[in-house]
Amino acid sequence: MRQYQHRLTARADKRGLLEITSEVEGWTRGQSVESGLLTLFIRHTSASLLIQENVSPDVLHDLERFLMRLVPEDEALYRHVEEGPDDMPAHIKGALTQTHLNVPILDGRLALGRYQGVFLFEHRRVPRDREVLLHLVGA
C-alpha cells in the first residue's frame, strides 16, 4: 500500500456549487494507484463537499435554492453576525452537509457513478480560495 497527499486550492467566485471532479481525478490518475480509497477533506467551516449530479444544472440550482430557503440570511435569527448576514447561515449549511468524502479508486479512476461529480459547495457570497486536502491510499 502507498499513500499520497495533496492540497487542492479551488477558487469559489460566488456562493454555490463548483465542480472539482476533473482536478481531483487528474491528480488521482497521476499517482498511478489502480485500487484504493481517496479521502477529500475541506479545511473550512462555511463551505462543504458533495457528490452530486453533474449533468443537469437544474439539480445544482434547486439544491442551492433549497438550502437558501432552509437557512435564511436573517440577522434577527442569529447571534453570530459580526462577519455579515451570510456568515452564520454558511456555518449552518456547512454543518448540514459534509466536510469530507470517501471515493473508491477502481482501475486507476474515481469510482463515481455515471452522473456523479465532486463539488465544493461554497456557502458565502464573497469570492475566496478554498483548500481541499486529498489523501489517497492504495496500490
Image (tube, rainbow, N blue to C red):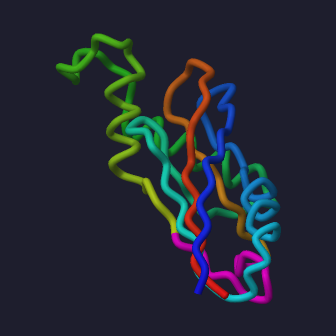
| Frontmost residue, 132 versus 125 | 132
Taking 125 as reference, is 134 above or below it?
A: below
Residue, x 50% and y 45% (percent of image)? 66
Residue 11 pos. (x, y %): 68, 32
Left or right: where 107 falls relative to 91: right
Using the rendered view, name the quadrant where residue 86 is placed: top left
Extent of the magenta region: 102-113
Q: Position of residue 18 (x, y in %)?
A: 69, 43
Give the left or right position of residue 30, taking residue 90 as reference: right
Across the whole image, how many numbered discs are drawn on residues?
Answer: 0
Residue 104, magenta (yes or no): yes
Residue sitting at x 63%, y 54%: 6
Q: Nearer the viewer, residue 26 or 61?
A: 26
Q: Where 104 falls versus 71 (above or below)?
A: below
In the rendered image, the residue lying farthest to the left is 79
- Which image quarter: residue 98? bottom left
Depth order, front residue of 139/75 = 139
- Quadrant where the N terminus lies? bottom right
Q: Residue at x 65, y 26 (%)?
A: 14
Outermost residue toward the front? Answer: 2
- Nearest the camera: 21 or 57? 21
As drawn, 34 above or below 86? below
Where is residue 135? Give x, y as percent.
55, 65
Which part of the image, by quadrant, shows the C terminus?
bottom right
Q: Position of residue 132 (x, y in %)?
A: 56, 48
Residue at (50% x, 34% y) in the render: 123
The magenta stretch spans residue 27: no
